[in-house]
């Protein structure tokens, strides 16, 4: 069927906001990078998504239906918007879903290696690194038992803001809320010793 025809990898509005597909911080540059990716040639013909799933990217055929052709400066009708949204849902390449305390990502194509075209490992590695970080983002690496914590990065530049997430839970795993916490940061000296900020 049409799953074997060449297509463009197209981020959805939600995909452009999701860290998995953020190749550049600037939204226009990010979209330009995705638009410059080579065509892909196969995707899984998904038969619909579970309620609550979010499509981050979809397959746009090289000869798309008329309602998917976005013209410069156009104001789409409600019907065009509905058709476009349905097309994204019917042709997902990447979709995410929250399942209980876990995260699920569906990738319905097998050609991320094409992201290396004329760029070496740059975008391919960034894509997979961000996908793995997104999938494990809620896993706090430090602590034990009822107290877990983690930072949004492993290393920070001097003067950069440090974001610390802390999860405190009771024995039955329900969260403890309403606490005021204080975090003390130290910087690592070249020799590995910690020094006060």
Image: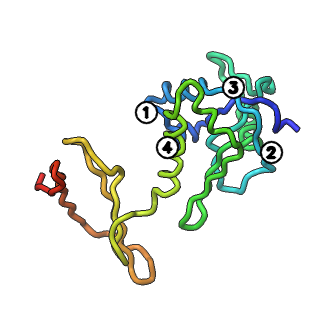
Residue appearing at x 31%, y 69% in the figure: 178
In the picture, residue 31 is in which quadrant?
top right
Q: Residue 186 appears at what percent x and percent y?
A: 17, 56
Disc 2 target residue: 45
Residue drawn at (18%, 60%) of the image: 184
Side of 79 where 33 appears, left or right: left
Question: In the rendering, at what x and y percent does residue 52 appear?
Answer: 65, 55
Q: Residue furthest left?
A: 196
Q: Position of residue 135 (x, y in %)?
A: 52, 55
Residue 61 in which image quadrant: top right
In this rendering, is residue 56 above or below 174? above
Residue at (71% x, 32% y) in the render: 40
Label whose residue precedes the other's in the sequence (3 or 4): 4
Find residue 76 and name its label: 3
Mark 3 or 2: in front is 2
Q: Which residue is mark 1?
A: 25
Q: Secondary structure at mark 3?
A: loop
Q: Name the image quarter holding the N terminus.
A: top right
- Numbered badge on residue 19: 4
Name the N-terminal-most of marks 3 and 1: 1
Disc 2 packing (10 Å; few <14; some 14–19; many ≥20) = some
- What kind of element bears circle 4? helix
Looking at the image, is mark 3 or mark 1 nearer the viewer? 1
Cα–Cα span, label 3 and label 4: 27 Å
């Amino acid at each position: 069927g049409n799953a074997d025809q060449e297509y463009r990898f197209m981020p959805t509005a939600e995909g452009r906001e999701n860290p998995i597909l953020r190749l550049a911080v600037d939204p226009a540059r990010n979209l330009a990078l995705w638009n410059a990716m080579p065509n892909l040639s196969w995707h899984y013909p998904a038969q619909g998504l579970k309620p609550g799933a979010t499509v981050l990217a979809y397959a746009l055929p090289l000869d798309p239906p008329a309602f998917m052709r976005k013209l410069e400066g156009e104001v789409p009708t409600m019907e065009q918007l509905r058709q476009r949204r349905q097309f994204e849902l019917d042709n997902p390449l990447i979709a995410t879903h929250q399942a209980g305390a876990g995260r699920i990502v569906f990738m319905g194509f097998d050609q991320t290696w094409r992201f290396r075209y004329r760029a070496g490992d740059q975008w391919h590695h960034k894509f997979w690194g961000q996908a793995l970080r997104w999938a494990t983002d809620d896993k706090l690496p430090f602590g034990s038992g009822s107290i877990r914590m983690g930072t949004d990065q492993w290393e920070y530049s001097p003067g950069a803001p440090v974001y610390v997430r802390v999860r405190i839970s009771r024995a039955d795993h329900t969260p403890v809320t309403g606490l005021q916490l204080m975090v003390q940061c130290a910087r690592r000296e070249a020799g590995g010793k910690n020094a006060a900020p």
